[in-house]
Amino acid sequence: MTLTELLVASILVGVVILGAVSSDYAIRTWQKRIEQRTMVQMDLARAMEQIVNGGRQTTGNGILNINMFTFVNNPDQGVSISYSTTQPIYIAFKHDLNWVLFHCGQDSEGPPYINRYIYMNGVWGPASTIFTPSVMDFFSLTLDSGKLQSININLATRPNPEADKNDLTNPEYTLSTSFLPPGLSQ
């Protein structure tokens, strides 16, 4: 084999190896993005399911816009849904014998969070963090002359909620739904 043939063969082998390496890199990057998106969507769906299930089990009548700390200290306000859209943001649903409260807050060092609390037998249970949102206003109520028309849940998050939104590296995913508790009378 001449030196020229050896040089051409080396270049061709290099091109083939470079093609294989770049294909491998592209596939790994694509797989990482798909995995990241799937994990975020599963978190969104799980949090949405917990909130909607808590709301759909509501029994009784009446809604009340009241500060969370006032409500937590005295949950027996004679209503079935208690909420506040100002800080601290929360919504609580009365079930037959207990309350389920979803609170959106943020510590000084960390990202926002949505915690779930259960009030049973006169005691509030420990918090369980169900979600890390990128937007703190996770619900709204549609009212008509003081009557509840629907509860709208809007969850949004990013793979890294602490980092700024970036369509390529940190896209935002959202999930929304509306419902009216079937056990709520008005």
Image (cartoon, grey):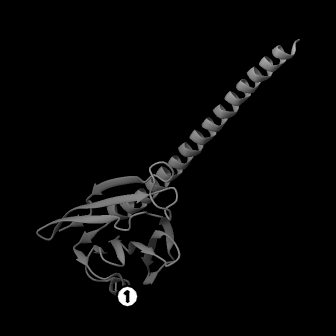
- Quarter of the image that includes the C terminus: bottom left
Nearer the observer, 12 or 182: 12
Above or below, 25 against 91 in this view is: above
**In this rendering, is residue 8 above or below 171?**
above
Q: Secondary structure at mark 1?
A: helix
Look at the picture and state if 173 lies above or below 69.
Answer: above
Residue sitting at 71 percent across and 25 percent down?
A: 15
Residue type indicated by callout 1: Asn
How would you rate the neighbour count of disc 1 (Cα within 10 Å): few for under 14, some for 14-19, many for 20 or more? few
Residue at 47% across, 57% down:
158
> Which image quarter holds the N terminus?
top right
Q: Residue 99's spot in the image, x, y percent?
A: 38, 74
The image quarter in which residue 172 lies: bottom left
Write down the residue under mark 1: 73
Q: Is residue 29 visible?
A: yes
| Left or right: where 63 falls relative to 73 | left
Q: Is residue 163 left or right of residue 180?
A: right
Name the residue at 86% across, 16% down: 3
Tell me where residue 16 appears, x and y as whole percent: 72, 24
Q: Residue furthest left?
A: 145
Give how far across and how far down residue 14 sits, in percent. Answer: 75, 26
Place residue 2 in its image quadrant.
top right
Q: Is residue 181 visible?
A: no
